[in-house]
Amino acid sequence: MKLVDLLKPEAVKVIYAASSKKRLLHDIADLAQAAYGLSAHDAVHALQDRESLGPTGVGNGVALPHARIDGLDAVKGAFILLEKPIDFESVDRQPVDLCFALFAPQDAGVEHLKALAAVSRALRDTSMCAKLRVNADPAKLYAILTEVASVQAA
């Protein structure tokens, strides 16, 4: 699975200051609504429900919040770069500044797992994370994310 299949340019955003994890989840839901027409209310509640099972901060400043949403036809992604890292209750207790959220249909078992694996693999690449962290232009962030996906697929 390629990140270009999960992410639209409109679903990439830079946020200069998120006050908390809860605020970031709301920002993600708003971004998903703007890019994909998802209900921000449903999206934030689904993300919060998933977070209540265990935090999705995977370490090294990266969070991969994800949730299942009724009515989706495919897995959708949203990416946020935070200029100011926040506490996300990550496994390594480090603050998060890279957040790639996934929204999957209720019945997308394997597709959801493949998407999560692809995003996780991409954001484990320290050089890619470094490139993301020095770019504040959403178009450049999208290009970096989708370029890596193309290279990985080759």
Image (cartoon, rainbow, N blue to C red):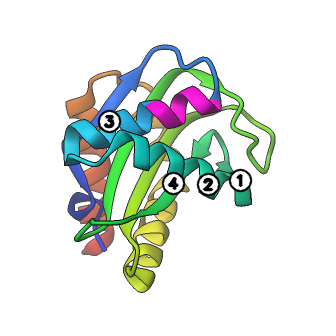
Q: Mark 4 = which residue?
A: 46
- The magenta stretch spans which residues? 21-26
Q: Can residue 125 be seen in this view?
A: no
The quarter of the picture where the C terminus appears is bottom left
The Cα atoms of the two marked residues, 3 and 2, are separated by 18 Å
Q: What's under tag 1, amino acid-wise?
A: Ser
Q: Position of residue 65 (x, y in %)?
A: 54, 52
Q: Name, please, the residue furthest toward the bottom.
A: 110
Does residue 7 sit above or below 84 in this rendering?
A: below
Check whether the beta carbons of the residues at disc 2 and disc 1 lie within 8 A of each other: yes
Mark linked to residue 31: 3
The quarter of the picture where the N terminus appears is bottom left
The Cα atoms of the two marked residues, 2 and 1, are separated by 5 Å
Does residue 83 sit above or below 28 in this rendering?
A: above
Q: Quadrant of residue 3?
A: bottom left
Check whether the beta carbons of the residues at disc 4 and disc 2 lie within 8 A of each other: yes
Q: Mark 2 = which residue?
A: 49
Q: Mark 1 = which residue?
A: 52
Element class at badge 1: helix
Q: Can residue 20 be seen in this view?
A: yes
Element class at badge 2: helix
Check whether the beta carbons of the residues at disc 3 and disc 2 lie within 8 A of each other: no
Mark in front: 3 vs 1: 1
Q: Position of residue 41 (x, y in %)?
A: 41, 41
Does residue 9 sit above or below 76 in this rendering?
A: above
Query: Which tag, 1 or 4, sits closer to the chain's start?
Result: 4
